[in-house]
Image (spheres, grey):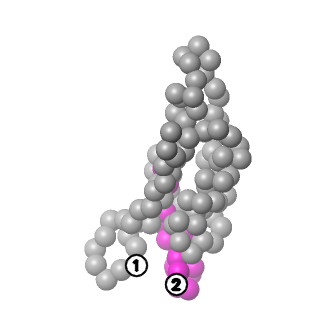
Amino acid sequence: MLTVSIVNAQFIAPIGLYPQESKTLNQIGVDVHVSKASGIDDLPFIDYTEVYGLIRTTILKHHKTLEEIINDLYKAIKALHPGCLLDIKVRKLHPPVSGQIDYTEVSFKDEQ
């Protein structure tokens, strides 16, 4: 199994349920792990720059929830790499709540 990972890609994006979040924007962190079955002598090529481009394009669109981002990322990466296994995490850093929170995170991982 070959895995290519992009860890803690950071973006400022209009993510949120509340109108002010589209104006003030949010800091978003993303981890994506793309895995493909292979033997050591037949490793597939997974271009991390293409995967990063999909992440960037997806994140910069307006989404109401982190779950929507996960769904869109999953579909886009699966279209680029059919048959791969994905592990995706999306974080909103310092979310607008009344307390002190480093981040909230939503994740989805393919089961083998």
As drawn, the residue found furthest toward the left would be 100
Density class for disc 1 (Cα within 10 Å; few <14, some 14-19, many ≥20) is: some
User: Residue 35 falls in which quadrant of the image?
Assistant: top right
Is tag 1's residue or tag 2's residue first in the polypeptide sequence? 2
Residue neighbourhood size for the residue with mark 2, other residues' Cα within 10 Å, grouped as few (<14), some (14–19), many (≥20): few
Q: Position of residue 48 (x, y in %)?
A: 60, 39
Q: Is residue 47 above or below residue 40?
A: below
Q: Is residue 21 magenta?
A: yes
* Badge 1 vs badge 2, beta-carbon distance below 8 Å: yes
Residue 93 position in % (x across, y down) = 41, 66
Q: What secondary structure is marked by label 1?
A: loop
Residue pointed to by mark 1: 96
Q: Residue at x 51, y 66 (%)?
A: 66
Which contiguous range is marked in magenta? 13-31
Q: Residue reaching furthest front?
A: 112
On screen, 22 above or below 48? below
Q: Residue at x 52, y 84 (%)?
A: 18
Q: Is residue 58 above or below residue 97?
A: above
Q: Position of residue 8 (x, y in %)?
A: 46, 50
| Residue drawn at 58 percent across, 32 percent down | 36
Q: Is residue 6 visible?
A: no
Q: Quick check: is 63 in the magenta stretch?
A: no
In the image, what residue type sits under mark 2? Tyr
Q: Examine the image and state in which quarter residue 95 appears.
A: bottom left
Q: Nearer the viewer, residue 75 or 6?
A: 75
Give the tally of numbered discs: 2
User: What residue is shown at x 31% (from left), y 70% (from top)?
Assistant: 101
Which label belongs to residue 62?
none
Q: Would you say 107 lies left or right of 99 here?
A: right
Disc 1 from disc 2: Cα separation: 10 Å
Examine the rendered structure and indicate whether residue 84 appears above or below residue 24. Answer: above
Mark 2 = which residue? 18
